[in-house]
Amino acid sequence: MTPTTADATRATVQRFLALRLAGDTAGLTALFAADVDWLLAENPVVPWIRPRSTAAECAAQFTELTDHTVPEEAGASIDTVLVDGADAVLMGHLSGTVRATGKSFEGPFALRLTVEGGRITRHHLYENSLSIAQACTP
């Protein structure tokens, strides 16, 4: 049976999740396309949220998140993965604690990824930005 575009997308999403879980920034950099359509609502009080567009910038977000939060108190669960051709949507719940304030955040998230040629070209994350901003504010 010939793999479909959806099969390739699903495989890339699984690789993305494995690399993210492993904290493999080099692997993530290789997985992102050279130019990425990155969307994460800007929030000036959250140090790891900023505009990004290159593979290295996108992969660095994960390191920056770890630098600013307490890894032992971070959590994410994925309830649903929907794949339609080159697009995937992951939905779940995330939580964490900001290192500088000791405050926690939590809430639902949705992540839209687009995969072209085995590389992630779109990364749009929708999350509870209010909870995260409150946790970052002393």
Image: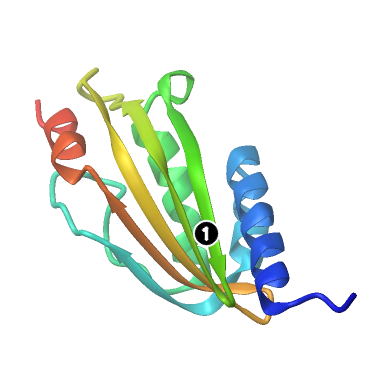
Q: What residue appears at the point 65 percent right and 39 percent down from the top-left corner?
A: 22
Q: What residue appears at the point 50 percent right and 40 percent down from the top-left corner?
A: 78
Q: Is residue 24 left or right of residue 46?
A: right
Number of disc labels: 1
Q: What residue appears at the point 19 percent right and 59 percent down from the top-left corner?
A: 42
Horizontal and vertical percent position of residue 2: 86, 79
Q: Nearer the viewer, residue 10 or 100?
A: 10
Q: Nearer the viewer, residue 2 or 53?
A: 2
From the image, tell me which residue sits under label 1: 82
Q: What residue appears at the point 27 percent right and 59 percent down from the top-left corner?
A: 50
Horizontal and vertical percent position of residue 21: 60, 39
Give the SS element for disc 1. strand
Q: Amino acid at mark 1?
A: Leu
Q: Nearer the viewer, residue 24 or 130?
A: 130
Q: Is residue 118 left or right of residue 60?
A: right
Vertical placement of residue 129 versus 38, above or below: above
Horizontal and vertical percent position of residue 88: 52, 64
Q: Quadrant of residue 31?
A: bottom right
Vertical placement of residue 111 versus 85, above or below: above
